[in-house]
Image: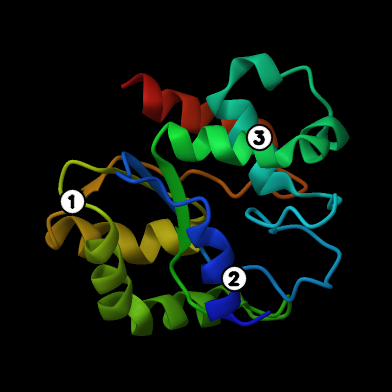
């Protein structure tokens, strides 16, 4: 699935007014790929959809005891609630990154795309919108340029990507940012 196709899918869940914008690193791989990072895809249950499940668990305490399978089975309703509550997620990069791309390569790609990212963020939000950057690559490269452009980046420190590791750290840090 190309970025434009994924962006079209994401648009179905765009709030009328975005109160919180999450910025992750890069969009998911093509739809047929089985792994994680399929935040806005509801075509079928996904295994290891850690970004979606941990975001929902951080925002909605009633989901804490739900399994990933239970959350995946009700994904559409949680995405609609996420939307209704003014949440939206985009990625710093507009193309999916292959697993083998190194951290320095990813950071360089984000650096190269900063003008476009700032433009995209400006099309979505205003200076009141709370922005949370997810993953070290995004946080380390984009925090200061987004702030310099006048955006309200909440992170003072890294919010880990909730992959196989860091899931509880992700939920805790997201909850802490929202409590402030």
Q: Kindly identify which numbered label has been placed on residue 161.
A: none
**Side of 173 relative to 16 (left or right):** right
For marks 1 and 2 on the same chain, the one whose residue lies earlier in the sequence: 2
| Residue for badge 1 | 126
Residue at 75% in and 49% down: 49
Tell me: residue 118, above or below residue 108. Answer: above
Q: Residue at x 54, y 60 (%)?
A: 10
- Circle number at residue 77: 3
In this picture, residue 169 sits left or right of residue 53: left
Q: What is the x, y in percent for residue 163?
A: 71, 50
Identity of the residue drawn at 84% across and 30% down? 70
The front one of 119 and 115 is: 119
Q: Is residue 156 visible?
A: no
Q: Is residue 103 visible?
A: yes
Whether residues under marks 1 and 3 lie with C-beta atoms below 8 angstroms apart, the answer is no
Q: Do the CB atoms of the residues marked 2 and 3 lie less than 8 Å apart?
A: no
Which residue sits at x=25%, y=69%?
118
For label 1, the SS is loop
SS at circle 3: helix
Instruction: State which quarter of the image contains the N terminus.
Output: bottom right
Mark 3 Cα-neighbour bin, 10 Å: few <14, some 14–19, many ≥20? few
Task: Kindly identify which residue carries mark 2.
Answer: 6
Task: Assign a secondary structure to mark 2.
Answer: helix
Give neighbour class at mark 1: few <14, some 14-19, many 20+ (Cα, 10 Å): some
Vertically, is 56 above or below 2?
above
């Amino acid at each position: 699935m190309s970025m434009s196709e994924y962006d079209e899918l994401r648009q179905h869940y765009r709030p009328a007014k975005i109160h919180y914008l999450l910025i992750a690193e890069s969009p998911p791989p093509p739809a047929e790929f089985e792994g994680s990072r399929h935040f806005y895809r509801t075509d079928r249950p996904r295994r290891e959809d850690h970004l979606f499940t941990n975001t929902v668990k951080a925002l909605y305490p009633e989901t804490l005891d739900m399994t990933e399978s239970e959350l995946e089975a009700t994904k559409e309703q949680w995405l609609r609630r996420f939307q209704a509550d003014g949440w939206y997620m985009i990625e710093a990069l507009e193309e999916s990154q292959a697993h083998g791309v190194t951290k320095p390569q990813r950071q360089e790609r984000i650096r190269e795309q900063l003008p476009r990212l700032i433009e995209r963020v400006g099309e979505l939000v205003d200076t009141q919108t709370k922005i949370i950057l997810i993953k070290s690559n995004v946080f380390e490269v984009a925090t200061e340029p987004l702030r310099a452009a006048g955006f309200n980046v909440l992170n003072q420190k890294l919010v880990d990507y909730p992959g196989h590791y860091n899931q509880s750290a992700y939920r805790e840090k997201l909850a802490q940012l929202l409590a402030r």
